[in-house]
Image (cartoon, rainbow, N blue to C red):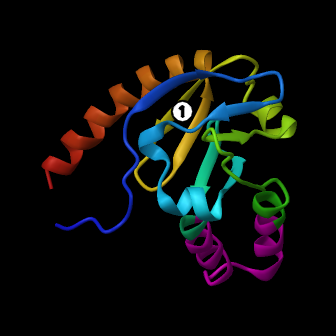
């Protein structure tokens, strides 16, 4: 199997500076991210999801072309797009994380940036510690169920 997109893997600890900036790990600074920036939005588990623009466009397309009742689609679009922010990576490889998203994810000082295949996640260190433990336990259960098929 050939992977023809950047695969984000690993976890990296950083601090948010006084201006709300956080570094993107050097290995995650793809040409696309440097050139086009990224889109930040609330993640499902109290984290911030960071999408390269190409991945964000795929998500947007899937949300507008699915078999969803128009009234539910409007609510979904409001929930997703009204809470998203375009960001650019500065010369030092940092992004500004809007205060609304930092509040949502309970991010104050120490953070963990994780790779999640085609996108990144930004967690408060405390929330990541709990989520990592839970996710690893569940992952093995999921893998075992896939192997039985």
Viewed as shown, does residue 9 lie left or right of 36?
left
**From the viewer's perspective, is residue 21 above or below residue 32?**
above
**From the viewer's perspective, is residue 5 above or below residue 121?**
below
Location of residue 63 (image quadrant): bottom right
Q: Is residue 17 magenta?
A: no
Location of residue 10 (image quadrant): top left
- Image position, residue 76 (x, y; %): 76, 65
Please rate how many residues cluster around mark 1, counting C-alpha atoms within 10 Å: few if below 14, some from 14 to 19, many from 20. Answer: many
Which image quarter is the N terminus in? bottom left
Whether residue 103 is visible to the viewer of this picture, yes or no, is yes
- Image position, residue 58 (x, y; %): 56, 73
Location of residue 99 (image quadrant): top right
Magenta stretch bounds = 56-77
Q: Nearer the viewer, residue 84 or 131?
A: 84
Viewed as shown, does residue 139 lie left or right of 74?
left
- Image position, residue 35 (x, y; %): 60, 63
Q: Is residue 61 magenta?
A: yes
Is label 1 in a helix, a strand or a loop?
A: strand
Which image quarter is the C terminus in? bottom left
Q: Which residue is mark 1?
A: 113
Determine the residue positioned at 60% across, 15% down: 126
**From the viewer's perspective, is residue 39 above or below residue 129?**
below
- Image position, residue 5 (x, y; %): 37, 65
Whether residue 52 is visible to the viewer of this picture, yes or no, is no
Determine the residue positioned at 44% across, 56% down: 118
**From the viewer's perspective, is residue 62 above or below residue 42?**
below
């Amino acid at each position: 199997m050939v992977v023809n997109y950047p695969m984000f893997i690993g976890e990296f600890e950083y601090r948010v500076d006084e201006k709300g900036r956080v570094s993107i790990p050097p290995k995650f600074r793809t040409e696309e991210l440097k050139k086009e920036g990224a889109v930040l939005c609330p993640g499902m588990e109290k984290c911030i999801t960071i999408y390269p623009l190409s991945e964000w466009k795929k998500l947007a397309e899937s949300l507008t072309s699915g078999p969803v009742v128009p009234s539910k689609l409007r609510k979904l679009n409001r929930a997703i797009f009204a809470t998203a922010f375009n960001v650019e990576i500065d010369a030092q490889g940092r992004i500004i994380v809007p205060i609304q998203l930092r509040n949502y994810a309970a991010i104050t000082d120490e953070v963990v940036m994780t790779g999640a295949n085609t996108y990144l996640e930004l967690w408060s260190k405390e929330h990541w510690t709990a989520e990592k433990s839970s996710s690893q336990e569940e992952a093995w259960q999921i893998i075992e169920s896939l192997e039985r098929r």
